[in-house]
Amino acid sequence: MGLNGALLSALAREGYETPTPIQARAIPDVIKGRDLLGIAQTGTGKTAAFALPILHRLAENRTPPRPGQTRALILSPTRELASQIADSFRAYGQNMGFRIGVIFGGVKYGPQERALKQGLDVLVAAPGRLLDHVQQRNIDLSGVEIFVLDEADQMLDLGFIKPIRQVVSRMTGRRQNLFFSATMPTEIGKLAAELLKDPVRVQVTPQATTVERIDQGVIIVEAGRKRALLSEMFADDRLKRCLVFTKTKHGADKVAAYLEAGGVSAGAIHGNKSQSQRERTLEAFKAGRLRALVATDIAARGIDVDAVSHVVNFELPFVPESYVHRIGRTARAGADGVAISLVSPDEMKLLRDIERTTRQKIKSWDRRNDKALAALDASIMQAGVGRKPTMPERETPEPRSRRRTRGATVRPDGGGQPHRVRGRGKGAGTGPRAAAPAARPAYDPMSAERKPAVEGDFKIKRRRRRKPQSA
């Protein structure tokens, strides 16, 4: 394909032999300097499709970067995806001596500021933190020669369209623009029409279709029994490295804790975790120390882990296109994968939306479906299955009637004014501080006066009613 010799050496060390369809069609046009609009499913090699020709072009016209500027700018929607793109650039250009930087939020500001002021050949950035540095005048975008917008449709979903326009307005018109995305909604198409000049359109698969190598299935289960079923599924040894997707951050933590209590090594990543926590958890998952990684849609794109055997949709996403990105975490680099969706009756509408968007019927796995049972153990599919893991038991508090008895109690010494225990009425208390009150002598109606009370006896005074004050 005419790539630089140093790039070919790096690709050989990385084990790259044959380009994917998106790479074969995009690399020649990008090398020529043309704008490009690329549409391909996640996991088909889009990163190499723009990283390799960018490094080739920078090497052909090698000039040292100016302080506070960058020659190539790649915008990414998430921190994890930005880190992975930067790692890919470093791996491909390891013999070329380029300065490659990555900036995003959630980490210290100082190291990023120092790297920007030195000047970079390639900068991978999240839009929010990039605009912060622009406003602080740590970087000047007027020297950008190549601009890449990766996962453009997710940028739209996360509300980054306005920051993208602000970034583009600070760059000159003499640049090459590359848009890559798994889907192409109407809004992104309009933005591409504004920014791209006579682009080459590369579409290797229909929009919003799923990878054919993924064996997809749906299990209908009540919402309250999903966690028990998920825990039971891990009894199958075929679930070696599993990604579990939830809708909410709190839900991800609860599912991960439930799996841990059931003996499954699991971790959670979401937006409320610090960047160091997310990196440690993701690294443990990549190294195989975690069998399950529970995440929100923040990980639907940006996680490139080899040998993910299963993807489980614990809850279906509200946006049908997110389903495509979720299950695309498996069956990467030519491998096969399994995608399981736990669908409660109230999620049937979301399932129909997904089937309409992907233009295919997702099979329902039951005992009559022999092919589906080959992917999961038959016991998992039985009705009423779900062994609840042992959870730490809480101490059951005593009923109120046993903790307290109505009325007042007497001090142990029997003297002085006795204290009262809050209750619903009058009577003697039986709490730990209460002592048995002294016996009250019987009243003799024939006697003129009451017999003397024993020590510790007391009388409960009734509260007088106050007379209403006159006006």
Image (cartoon, rainbow, N blue to C red):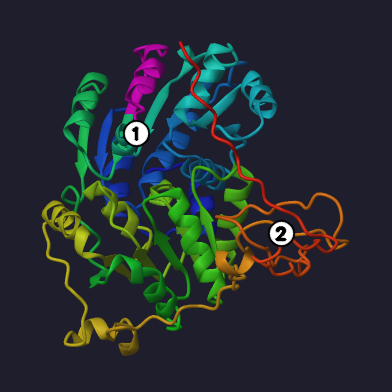
Q: Quadrant of the C terminus?
A: top left
Label 1 residue SS: helix
Magenta stretch in the rendered image: 159-177
Q: Quadrant of residue 180?
A: top left
**Numbered badge on residue 307:** none
Q: 35 or 86: which is nearer to us?
A: 86
**Residue 304 visible in the picture:** no
x and y percent of residue 16 in the render? 44, 58
Residue type at mark 1: give it: Met
Q: 406 or 95: which is nearer to us?
A: 406
**Residue 391 visible in the picture:** yes
x and y percent of residue 448 in the render? 71, 59
Where is 470 relative to 45, above or below? Answer: above
Which residue corresponds to mark 2?
448
Where is 435 relative to 75, above or below? Answer: below
CA neighbours of label 2 inside 10 A, class few (<14), some (14 to 19), many (20+): few
